[in-house]
Amino acid sequence: SQQGEEDPQALSIQEGENATMNCSYKTSINNLQWYRQNSGRGLVHLILIRSNEREKHSGRLRVTLDTSKKSSSLLITASRAADTASYFCATDASGSYKLIFGSGTRLLVRP
Amino acid sequence: DVKVTQSSRYLVKRTGEKVFLECVQDMDHENMFWYRQDPGLGLRLIYFSYDVKMKEKGDIPEGYSVSREKKERFSLILESASTNQTSMYLCASRPQVRGNQPQHFGDGTRLSIL
């Protein structure tokens, strides 16, 4: 199974509400990254949190990391219709070249 | 900004054809990656390259090969295309190995094998 697993698989909210997505993983990591993908396009990097960090902010994004529970969450505050996309977490494991992606959360923000 | 360019957004080929997907990055990144993305399966790594002429198999290399003759270009080759290779293909690059750096993605090639 995938290293990173997002929850929920799909989320529908009203514009202005907050959206929270969760990611769980299985092995030790150097960092965890969140990406966004608009329909039919490539992935865009949003934020990277290192294993020794617990929380990170970027604009309306807030990411937390709990290495003891092997989990992370992405919070998008004051959502907009333009935030509609799929969101993926990816883990950068210790001693590995590659990122391991989860299957993503599809977010729909209704105007 | 880093730019990763994939040669085609959409491609339609026939079963048995040899198919080339091209990817070029403009930031002198050492690492380049090829993924395929299928509904419900997320992104799966096909091959990656950590230097010119260097390559390593990812999780699903069967039916694929790669070529990296120049640092900026990483090609994915479907030796004899089959219908189960219909998918979205994504190329990515990253500046250093095992560093805390994100990957930069191209816009993808949606490949249909008929």
Image (spheres, rainbow, N blue to C red):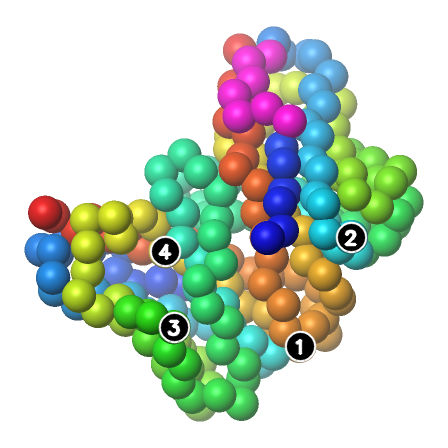
Q: Which mark is residue A30?
A: none
Asked whether B10 falls inside the magenta stretch, the response is: yes
Where is A78 relative to B42, above or below? Answer: below
Measure the C-alpha gap from mark 3 to mark 4: 15 Å
Q: Secondary structure at mark 4?
A: strand
Quickly name the residue at label 1: A94
Where is B78 relative to B36, above or below? Answer: above
Q: Is residue A23 left or right of residue B88?
A: left
Q: Is residue A102 left or right of residue B101?
A: left
Q: Nearer the viewer, mark 3 or mark 1?
A: 3
Mark 1 is surrounded, within 10 Å at the Cα level, by few (under 14), some (14 to 19) or many (20 or more) other residues, namely: some
- Quarter of the image for residue B53 reads top right
Quickly name the residue at label 2: B28
- Quarter of the image for residue A46 reads bottom left
Where is B64 relative to B29, above or below? Answer: above
Q: Looking at the picture, which amino acid does disc 1 mark?
A: Ser
Query: Do the residues bearing badges 3 and 4 touch, measured as CB atoms within 8 Å?
Result: no
Q: Chain of mark 4?
A: A
Quickly name the residue at label 4: A87
Q: Can residue B93 be seen?
A: yes
Q: Which residues are magenta?
A: B7-13
x 48%, y 88%: residue: A53
Q: Chain of mark 2?
A: B
